[in-house]
Every structure is written in structure tokens, then in C-alpha cells.
Amino acid sequence: MNIANLMVNEQSSIRIIASSNLYFDPFNLPNEPHDADIVFITHEHFDHFSRKDMEKAANEKTIFAVPKKMKNAIMKFDIPEERIYQLVPGQSALICGVPVQAVAAYNTNKPFHPKSNGWLGYVVTVDNSRIYICGDTDDTPEARAVKCDIVCVPVGGTYTMDAKEAALFVNYIKPRIAVPVHYGVVVGKPADADIFERNVYKNIPVCRKLFF
């Protein structure tokens, strides 16, 4: 996949334009494209599960992929149940022709994202590239087991890995490209991306993308 087709808005709000249009945790979208084939939600926190931004991305055919334990929360949005795909950690699925792997996303030494919540990151295969959207997670055995070409990894600290921890994680899984996310808005400073890039192996390009 051409990395130019992957764009980061704010926090972990990510858009992939390919054979299918994929949105992950849409947040503070600047416009209303209504072009999403699939909207992936990693967990219930407000900067990842925003009704108004989901509605900006979605149309009447959009499928929503969510952690199974979020079923009750998303059903409050009056989305038909047949358009909601519930996933649990470790599950693989084919959604609208897109191969999807659900990966546990949780904290190991913080209380904000308990493993018991069943919250997720996602690996999607698009145009022969495996893209790992980590969600809000620490450096965990499940995350380290992922094989991917591109990783979108949180670097802002407090609720997730900090910049140096994220760099160590990326250096371990060795993707082709690393994209820092989850910094500079709700938590973390823009400088965190610089710290991350300085600590990632030089043979792994760090790419920052915005769409507005």
C-alpha cells in the first residue's frame, strides 16, 4: 500500500483510502466525507468513540467493527445490528472483503485500559500490506506477536506507551514503516513524535501524515 493513502487526523483518528475506505477511531474530523466502508472502534473512551465523528465518516451502508464488550454502547447509536461486527481479542475475520485480525489492547502498569475490557487494536490487510492500528496499549506480548508492514503506534504516554517505549516496541516488531499517533491533542506533546523518531532504528522510516 502507498503510505500516502494512510492519513492521521488527531489522536488515533486514522483514515486509509484503498480498495475500501477504512476509518479507525474517527475524532475531530474537519469535514463530513460519508465515505467509510468500515469504521473500526478500538474502545469506549471519548477520543476514540465519538458519535458525531462516526456519523461524519459513515453512510447508510457503513459497517462498524467494535470490541464485543462494546455492543450495548454502540447499539445506543441506532445502528442496525446487521451493520455491527463484534470482535474479541485473537479473532480473525473477513469484513467487506478486508482481512481483519483483532489484537488485545491494554495497559500492563496503568489502570486506564484493563485487559478484562476486551478492547482492541486491529491488523488489516489492504493492497497486500498488513497495517497494525495498535489502539491504546502498552508494549504487550500480544502486540509483540504481530507481524506487519506498517504500524500506527501510540507515543503520548500517560494512557499508553510513551515515545521511548513505543520506539523499543517498534524496534522489536520491525515493521517496514512506523507512524506515531496519540500525541499532541488530548495527551502528549508534538515533541513526542521527535523523541520517537530519534529512538527508532534508522532503517525503519517514521512517517507522519495529516489530512484536512
Image (cartoon, rainbow, N blue to C red):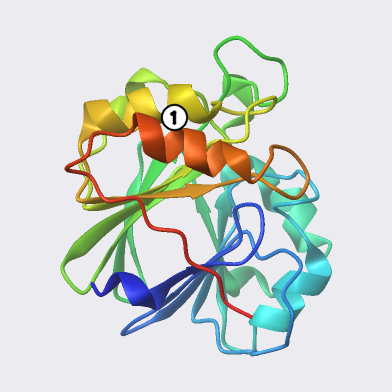
Compare residues 129 and 161 and report the one nearer the observer.
Answer: 161
For residue 2, what is the image quadrant?
bottom left
For residue 173, what is the image quadrant?
top left
Q: Which residue is drawn at 53% across and 53% down?
A: 86
Q: Is residue 31 left or right of residue 100?
A: right
Q: Residue at x 34, y 19 (%)?
A: 141
Image quadrant in which the C terminus is located: bottom right
Pinpoint residue 116: horizontal percent, then vertical percent.
60, 21
On screen, residue 68 above or below 41: above
Pinpoint residue 117: horizontal percent, then vertical percent.
64, 29
Please say whether residue 199 is visible from this viewpoint. yes
Amino acid type at mark 1: Ala
On screen, residue 34 above or below 98: below
Compare residues 30 and 203 and report the one nearer the observer.
Answer: 203
Image quadrant in which the N terminus is located: bottom left
Q: Is residue 54 left or right of residue 208?
A: right
Pinpoint residue 103: horizontal percent, then vertical percent.
40, 38
- Quick one: SS at disc 1? helix
Please say whether residue 104 is visible from this viewpoint. no
Compare residues 2 and 26 and report the one nearer the observer.
Answer: 2
Identify residue for label 1: 166
